[in-house]
Amino acid sequence: MRYFAYGSNLDWAQMRQRCPSARFVCAAKLPGHQLAFTRRSTDRGCGVADVVPEANAEVWGAVFEFDERDVGSLDSSEGFVPGRALAANSYTRDERQVFRDGNLHEPLTVWIYFAQRQNNPPRPNAAYKNLIVEGARYWHLPPDYLAELERIEVS
């Protein structure tokens, strides 16, 4: 399975804990979307990441490949149960195309988790933001995108 991580799963330690078979494939760009915090995590007590459609925006992340045996663990950590009513899930998982290293001639089909949005979610806290920023730095996401992440306001 190929998966596009754009939020706290950019943190390599967290990703390996959730999916021990995970292997980094590449940095990639998801065009036509922007990073947003549309949901409150009860576990983290803060707003958590989502990607929402935005025509002139892009979200960068890391593509991981992992064995099928780890899918259930990742689904569980994202609050997704296949077959359950959408409203009962925290996130849903859907296939999309991202572009290896931002190159529009190198598409990859990946799974991406999309949040079930809530009204008035809080901002992320500093610890959650740090997972995203440090993960982006670790995977060498583009400097402009990293600067954008560093400007995220926290609660």
Image: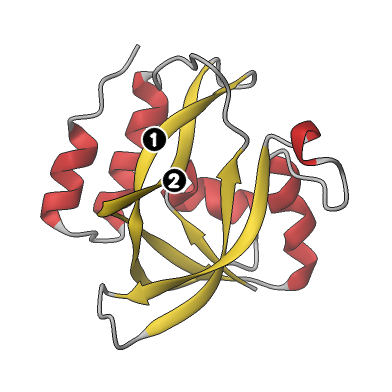
Type of amino acid at the residue the image marks with label 2: Val
Q: In the rendered image, which residue does mark 2 sit on?
A: 51
Q: Are marks 2 and 1 in contact (CB under 8 Å)?
A: yes
Q: Residue furthest front?
A: 55
Q: In screen coordinates, is 79 left or right of 16?
A: right
Type of amino acid at the residue the image marks with label 1: Ala
Q: Earlier in the sequence, mark 2 or mark 1?
A: 1
Mark 1 neighbour class, 10 Å CA radius: few under 14, some 14 to 19, many 20 or more: some
Identify the residue shown where x is 24% and y is 59%. Answer: 141
Q: In the rendered image, which quarter is residue 100 located in?
A: bottom left
Distance between the alpha carbons at the discs numbered 2 and 1: 6 Å
Q: Residue 65 appears at what percent x and percent y? A: 57, 73
Q: In the rendered image, which quarter is residue 22 located in?
A: bottom right
Q: Residue 140 appears at what percent x and percent y? A: 23, 61
Q: Is residue 52 above or below residue 41?
A: below
Identify the residue shown where x is 43% and y is 47%. Answer: 11
Q: Identify the element where label 2 is drawn.
A: strand
Identify the residue shown where x is 67% and y is 48%. Answer: 92
Instruction: Report the front residue among 102 and 65.
Output: 102
Q: In the rendered image, which quarter is residue 152 located in?
A: top left
Q: Is residue 70 above or below residue 106?
A: above
| Quarter of the N terminus within the rendering | bottom right
Q: In screen coordinates, is 144 left or right of 59?
A: left
Q: In the rendered image, which residue does mark 1 sit on?
A: 36
Q: Residue furthest bottom?
A: 105
